Every structure is written in structure tokens, then in C-alpha cells.
Amino acid sequence: MNIADNQELSSHLRTHFGEGIIVHGEYVEITIGKFERVAKYLKESLGYEFLSMITAIDYIDYFELVYRIEAFQNKATVQLKLKCEKVKPVVPSLSHLWYGARLQEREVYDLFGIEFSNHPNLKRIVLWEGFQGYPLRKDFKVKSYDAGN
Amino acid sequence: MEIEREPLTSSTEIENHEGAIIEDLRASSQNPLSDPTEWLEKTIERNILLTTVDAAINWARKTSLWPVTAFTACCTFEFIGASSSRFDIARFGMEVLRASPRQADLLVCGGTLTWKMAPQIKRLYEQMAEPKWVIAMGACAISGGIFHDSYSVVPGYNHIVPVDVYVPGCPPRPETLLAGIENLRRKIAQNSIKKSGTKR
Ligand code: SF4
């Protein structure tokens, strides 16, 4: 299927999934409940076949996950954003859709402490086992800054 | 198609083991090791014969420093610059970069050292045969540099191995490294085999 631009994509997703899909110009915000189905639909029906990155942002009230998915055929990119709660964040894993998601999800888990349900091998990847805390969270304390406050 | 791979049966065990080693090392390396200073002491009664032997041995040692190939980050490139034709450390008899620590006697610590890498560097150092020397090259190797308070970076190689010469810079230019090597050669020249036959 040929998707001309983000506008068309968003209306397409709206008609398919109804509420819970909010389009903000460049990116598409999705609720956790619909996330897996939207990703599957993007991959299998709309030709968005390449997951190029996963990352996370630590906001004051919530974590936000950012996924960039690309369609080579249409030369198109879509950004999905997903909010999850601060305490015990859990989001669905996309590792059954993209094998490459495994490593990236492990990295997000390692540095942000966000858990991915149904991930086959969720453990630290960059840091070592036994490391305390999640260093890219804003509340992670670093020595010199501790002394400062 | 999705590729399925069998995980190593005990990969979790391996990782836990590795993590425990790193945590141990981290806990025991909170303070820097003191720099070797014994070479500064002047032996009072030196006899003529030994000074000559010392001079010969030290000459041999300082003119054939063989660095071990163990570099961790960007400072390495300045070392590569220093070791290739323009700056040419072959002049000092040290162009032979050994791939085995057992054949090397100089560890040039070029680059940021993470705690995850630290056990390997310690092991390399321990595998090198005496006498052996260490040059800390660059801000990261001296103190952790811009990463000094990072969660994953060792704040200076001297937490892990005793350092003989510190070469400042980010990265140090090859000339600076050559000056450091020159200092190390001067330091080696002051050793005596009377002190247990090694550099200490
Ligand atoms: S001192 Fe500078 S150049 Fe050298 S490893 Fe550190 S950051 Fe890189």
C-alpha cells in the first residue's frame, strides 16, 4: 500500500484503530493498549518494515518511548511515541516483530529501567550485572553533583 | 524470517560472574594506587661494578621498550600517529607492538577506561613480565577526564595499575607522548638491579 505522507498515514491509522491515536505533525502518539497492534499493522500491511531505533525520554511525570520505523518502498518514516508510568514502567516488547528490537530494548532497559513484557532475554547489555540503578534516569545520582546539592 | 538462536545454556551465570568480578574490583579500587617512587631513592653505597652493570642493563631496557597492544579509546589514534613514520617511535626501539602482554614491558594506557573493561586491563598488566612500566596517556587515563564522575568510567588508570608517567592532553599530541616516553627513559635509567632486580 502506498502512503503519501504522515497526514494520510494518521487518518489511515485513525480509521483502523479509532481513539487512542493522536497525531502531532511529525509523530504519532499511541496508547500502550493499542501499541502492539499498530506496530504489527504498520509492518505487515503498510510496508513499514524496518525498525531503525528505539529510545526513551525521562520526563517529570512519565517516561516516553520513541520508535522510528521506516518504509523503504515509500521512502517514508514514522515516529511512534508511547507514554508509560514512572513507577514500574512496563511496555509491550516488539521483539516478535523485529529481531533487532531485542538489543535495543535491552539497552533501554539497561539505562532507563523500563521493562518490556514478553521480551525473551531481558537483562543488562551495556552495563554489567549487579550495577545499581539506571543511569539515564534524571534521578540517578552522580558523585560530584551529589556533593554540590 | 526471524532467526532463532539458542542462548548459551549458562549465559546468565557467565554474566553474573562477570558482574561480580567488576563489582569486586570497583569496590576495592576506590582509592588510587600510589605511584611507584622507589626509583627516586639514591643507594648510598654503590660500587663501581654495579653502577656499570646497572647502566648497561638500564640502557638495554630503556632502548627496547615494547608496548602491549591494549588501547581503549580515542587517545589511541595519537599513539598510532606517534608510532607511524612521521613521529616514528622506532627511534626509541619501541616500534614492536606486541599482541601478547608476556612479550611486552610497557603499557600505554591510551583512553577512557570503563569499569567493565578494567578487569581485563588489570589482567593484562599482571600478565606482563617484570620489569614493566605504565604510561597514562591523556586526561581520561590520568583522572577520568571529562568522564571523571561518570557511572561507568574508572577515574584514572592509577585505580587499577600503578602508573609511572602521566602524559596530559585530550588527546596529547605525539610530541607530548614522546616527551612522556623520554621521561620514562630517564626514570628507567635511574634504576638499580640491587633493588630486587626489578624496577621496584
Ligand atoms: S583524553 Fe580525550 S582523546 Fe584521550 S581518551 Fe579521553 S576523551 Fe579521548
Image: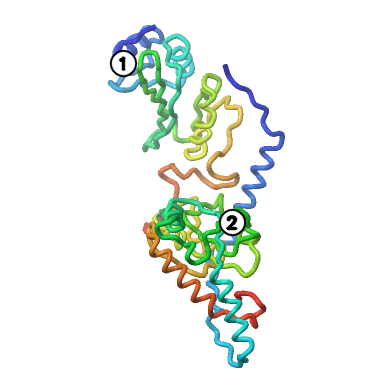
Quarter of image, ligand 1:
bottom left
- Quadrant holding the N terminus of chain A: top left
Q: Residue at x 53, y 42 (%)?
A: A126
- Quadrant holding the C terminus of chain A: bottom left
Amino acid on which the number 2 mark rests in the picture:
Arg
Q: Is residue B149 visible?
A: no
Say which quarter of the image contains residue A80: top left
Q: Which x, y percent locates residue B110?
A: 48, 57
Q: Secondary structure at mark 2?
A: loop
Label count reads 2
Q: Give the answer, above or below, for where B174 lies relative to B152.
A: below
Q: Nearer the viewer, mark 1 or mark 2?
A: 2
Q: Which x, y percent locates residue B94?
A: 52, 63
Label 1–label 2 contact, CB within 8 A: no
Q: Is mark 1 within 8 Å of ligand 1?
A: no
Scheme of image coloration: rainbow
Q: Is residue A113 visible?
A: yes
Name the residue carrying label 1: A6
Tell which subunit mark 1 falls on: A
Count neighbours of disc 1 (C-alpha within 10 A) and say few if under 14, some if 14 to 19, many if 20 or more.
some
Numbered tag placed on residue B118 in the rendering: none
Amino acid on which the number 1 mark rests in the picture:
Asn
Same chain? Circles 1 and 2 = no
Name the residue carrying label 2: B98
Left or right: residue A27 versus residue B156 is left
Q: Residue at x 56, y 39 (%)?
A: A124
Q: Which x, y percent locates residue B149?
A: 44, 56
In three-dimensional space, the C-alpha distance between marks 1 and 2, rounded to whole angstroms, equals: 56 Å
Q: Give the answer, above or below, for where B130 lies relative to B11.
A: below
Count neighbours of disc 2 (C-alpha within 10 A) and say few if under 14, some if 14 to 19, many if 20 or more.
some
Q: Give the answer, above or below, for where A107 lies relative to B124.
A: above
